[in-house]
Amino acid sequence: MSEGTDGAEVISGGYLPIDEEASVRANRSYWDNSAEEYLAEHGTFLGASDFIWCPEGIHESDVRLLGDVARKQVLEVGCGAGQCSRWLAEQGAITTGVDVSAGMLEQASRLQREHPLSAEATPPTFLLADARQLPFASNSFDRAFSSYGALPFVKDAEVVFAEVARVLRNGGQWVFSTTHPMRWMFPDVPGEAGLTVEYSYFDRTPYVELSSDGQPVYAEHHRTMSDWVRLLVEAGFTIDSVTEPEWPDENRTAWGGWSPLRGALMPGTAIFSTTLTKD
């Protein structure tokens, strides 16, 4: 048992059904209450204005999945504390980040205060919003991206994709990283116990944690690789590439179930790079 992020004791965690709105409520509460602790634990790894795609430590400055962003309107979906948007602003982008968690956006404001960007950069705009209801006019952005934001925590990812497609301009890029689907088969632990298959790859039942009063306090959703491909195609995106980062030798940091041990044997992240073609 552990202490829930809303102060309630977590007495169980397992694979349980949960509806769309309950999932969003649980994860909003989770990130509101754990934002400060999360940044205390992972802030050094993520930096104050760095763009890290995944626990493997892949930096956008090395892979350039978003290309030249100078003077581009760029949207970050599930921005957390906004480090990625801040880095893009230093590259000349006009960045906007949205997140469902007020706690995470408070951390974004703190980083802005404590680590101001250069005088040449336009500071990002951060807004409290559900990724399934983006508060922007259609055709507002040239690029959209998400680094482990929103998508693992919503049941209806197709709604997020539809919203991203709506606010992107024709030919716009949508690039996102998420947990590699094959990881669902393994326990989420970094050591030897995390190398044995325990779950079916094809079982889409969400992982849900419950408080002592039976309320969901965290939810994470699984989609197979073909699920992601189908959802993207149905939303009007053309898949340009899928990146499965190898674990770098120099990264000795374990992050939950991501670790050098597991990373040497299996992919932990999938990064989908896509282009929107509107009718």
Image (cartoon, grey):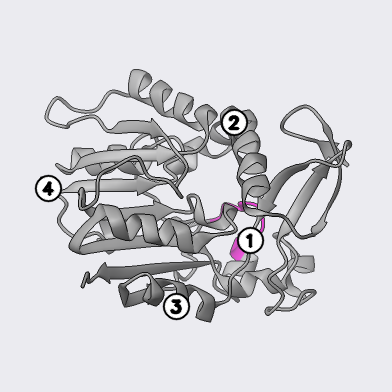
For the C terminus, the quadrant is bottom left
**Could you tell me how far apart the alpha carbons at marks 3 and 2 are, in whole angstroms?**
31 Å
Compare residues 228 and 246 and report the one nearer the observer: 228
Q: Residue at x 60, y 45 (%)?
A: 24
Reading the image, the residue beneath label 2 is 32
Reading the image, the residue beneath label 3 is 229
Q: Residues within 10 Å of mark 4 (few under 14, many from 20)?
A: some
Earlier residue among tags 3 and 4: 4
**Could you tell me how far apart the alpha carbons at marks 4 and 1 are, in whole angstroms?**
34 Å
Element under disc 4: loop
Q: Is 127 rendered above or below residue 133?
A: above
For badge 4, the amino acid type reads Ala
**Could you tell me how far apart the alpha carbons at marks 3 and 4 are, in whole angstroms?**
29 Å
178 is within the stretch colored magenta:
no
**Could you tell me how far apart the alpha carbons at marks 1 and 2 are, in whole angstroms?**
19 Å
3 and 4 marks in contact (CB < 8 Å): no
Q: Residue at x 21, y 50 (%)?
A: 141
Earlier residue among tags 4 and 2: 2
Would you say the magenta stretch is mainly helix, strand or loop? loop
Q: Residue furthest top?
A: 113
For badge 1, the amino acid type reads His
For badge 2, the amino acid type reads Asp
**Could you tell me how far apart the alpha carbons at marks 4 and 2 are, in whole angstroms?**
32 Å
Reading the image, the residue beneath label 4 is 70
How many numbered discs? 4
For the N terminus, the quadrant is top right
Q: Residue 130 at what x, y percent from top left?
A: 47, 42
Reading the image, the residue beneath label 1 is 221
Which region is colored magenta? 252-260
Q: Nearer the viewer, mark 4 or mark 1?
A: 1
Earlier residue among tags 4 and 1: 4
